[in-house]
Amino acid sequence: MSKNSSKNRIVQLVFLYPFFGGIAMQECAAGGKIVGYARVSKADQSLAQQVAQLRALGCDEIYTDQLSGKNARREGLQSALDTLTAGDQLVVPAFDRLGRNQRDLLNIAQELDEKGIALRSLREDIDTRTPLGRMFYSVCAMFAQFERDVISDRTKAGLAAAKAAGRRGGRPKAMDADMRNAIEQKLVGTCLSIAKIAKEHGVSSSTIYNAFPGGRAALIAKRFKVVSDFSVGLDRFQVVEDRTSGDFYWRMIGDTPNQVRAPYGPFPTADDAATALRQLL
């Protein structure tokens, strides 16, 4: 549904509200159980008044929460929603007791409507068993659809702008076993930056950091064992063993990790690596 059509339907419903509001409505046939829900936002506030209102209406069950509406762990509300089935009715003292915000209220109202559960708010005098109350559900549905359309349009526009700028949108690309091995080889055997490696494989730098805690230095320390450490003039060198393959390499102390690999090995023994190094010096 387009934003314009959503707006038009909302305008039509709002225009009809005074007409429906001035007519005495007959309630639809009631059935099922009546479940009440009350909430206060602070532990030192009392639920007594809200609970008394709900009991006066003859609620079969009453559930409560004593916490902020922004807190997602509303166990009382969840229990109330879980116990409701088609034909039942949920009663609240006011809509702000039910939803943390407008979006939350719309989502809950839609969920109840889809399950065939009636909703009644005492302060707003809304009962969805009546024609006027049904219109409330319709307005909620229209606003919810309108909000989804707006979010969808903004998302598409953002992805288009990112694509035009050369950025890849959507969820980050997952790293499978083959990609992980290839990236590990580049971290250990080349001097490419993590940002460059990430770009080559179509993943984010954070994906690589998460896959290899400690980065390149940790990989080198884990994979290579220092066999000997010696100096030639002012330069210091190491002969190291690859724990994975059993091969030997040599490098200058302080060199980037790629210098543990290709140009300086592999050699079958540590002595061979040391001899090759001395021949080059």
Image (cartoon, rainbow, N blue to C red):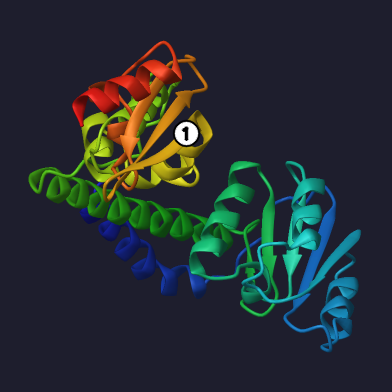
Amino acid beneath label 1: Ser
Please provide percent x and percent y for residue 241: 47, 24
Vertical arrangement, residue 241 with respect to residue 246, above or below: below
Q: Can you name the residue that lies furthest to the front here?
A: 233
Report the side of 7 relative to 30 (left or right). left
Please provide percent x and percent y for residue 269: 44, 14
Report the side of 127 relative to 144 (left or right). right
Report the side of 118 relative to 181 (left or right). right
Visible in this render: residue 1?
no
Vertical arrangement, residue 96 with respect to residue 173, above or below: below
The 10 Å Cα crowd at callout 1, few under 14, some 14 to 19, many 20 or more, is: some
Please provide percent x and percent y for residue 23: 53, 71
Visible in this render: residue 4?
yes
Q: Can you name the residue that lies furthest to the left here?
A: 164
Q: Nearer the viewer, residue 134 or 102?
A: 102
Q: Quadrant of the C terminus?
A: top left
Kindly identify the residue that appears in the image at 32 percent across and 54 percent down.
151
Kindly identify the residue that appears in the image at 30 percent across and 65 percent down.
11
**Residue carrying label 1:** 228
Please provide percent x and percent y for residue 136: 52, 62
Vertical arrangement, residue 16 with respect to residue 256, above or below: below
Vertical arrangement, residue 257 with respect to residue 83, above or below: above
